[in-house]
Amino acid sequence: MNKTSNLVKASFFLALGIIIPYIFHLAGIGGSILLPMHIPVLLCGFLLGTRYGLIVGFITPFLNSLLTGMPPIYPMALAMAFELATYGAISGYTYKSKHLNVYLSLIIAMLAGRAVYGIVNYILLATKGEEFLFKAFLVSSFVKPIWGIIIQIAIIPFIVKMLEKNKEPANLNG
C-alpha cells in the first residue's frame, strides 16, 4: 500500500512539475527566473525521499520538453535533468535519511544541484568544442534566478512542515 501511495504522490509531483511551469510560461513569466519546475521536485524529495525525488527530478525536464517544447531537449533539458535529479535526491537524503532540518537540507540540495548543473553544462559544451564561462554559470545559477531561490527558501520549508503536521496516522483498526 505504501509503495502505491508513494507512486501516486510522485506522479502528482511530476504533474505539478509540468503544469506549474506551463502556467508560468502562459503568463509570460520566465521559468529561468522563478524556477517553477524546481519546487515540485524539491517537495517530492522532502516528502517521499531520495529515490522518488531523483526519479521525478530526472524525468520532469524531459517530459516538459516533449509536451510543451520548453526547455529545449539539448542542452537545457539534459542539464536540468541532472540538476533536478540532484535536488530531489539530496533533499530526500539529507532530510529523510540524515534527519537534517528542512532549511539546511534545502540549502545543501540547492547548492549541490547547481554544482551538478554547472558540471553537466561544462561537459556538454566541451564535447561541442565550446567554452564554458564560469562567470556566465554564476549569473545564470545564482543572480538571474535570485527571486526563484528566495521563493524556494520561503515556501518549501513552510509547505513541508505544514504537510507533515497535517499527516494523519494510519487507522489500523479498520
Image (cartoon, rainbow, N blue to C red):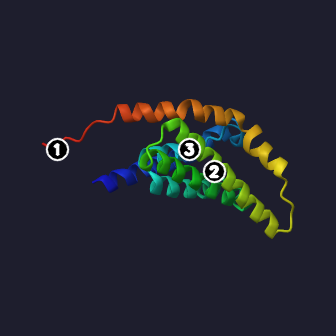
**In the image, residue 32 lies at what x, y percent?**
71, 43
Q: Which residue is mark 3?
A: 19
Quadrant position of residue 63: bottom right
The residue that appears at 61% across and 53% down in the rendered structure is: 64
Residue 172: assigned label:
1
**Residue 88: assigned label:** none
Between 106 and 24, which is closer to the camera in this rendering? Answer: 106
Under circle 3, the secondary element is: helix
Where is residue 101? Give x, y as percent.
48, 37
| Dot 3 or dot 1, earlier in sequence | 3
| Kind of element beneath mark 2 | helix
Question: Which residue has dot 2 on it?
Answer: 113
Report crowding for label 2: few under 14, some 14 to 19, many 20 or more residues within 10 A (C-alpha).
Answer: many
Which comes sooner in the sequence, label 1 or label 2? 2
Q: How many residues crowd mark 1 within 10 Å: few (<14), some (14–19), many (20+)?
A: few
Q: Position of residue 95 (x, y in %)?
A: 46, 44
Residue 61 lies, with reference to residue 22, above or below; the image says below
How far apart are the alpha carbons under marks 3 and 2? Answer: 22 Å
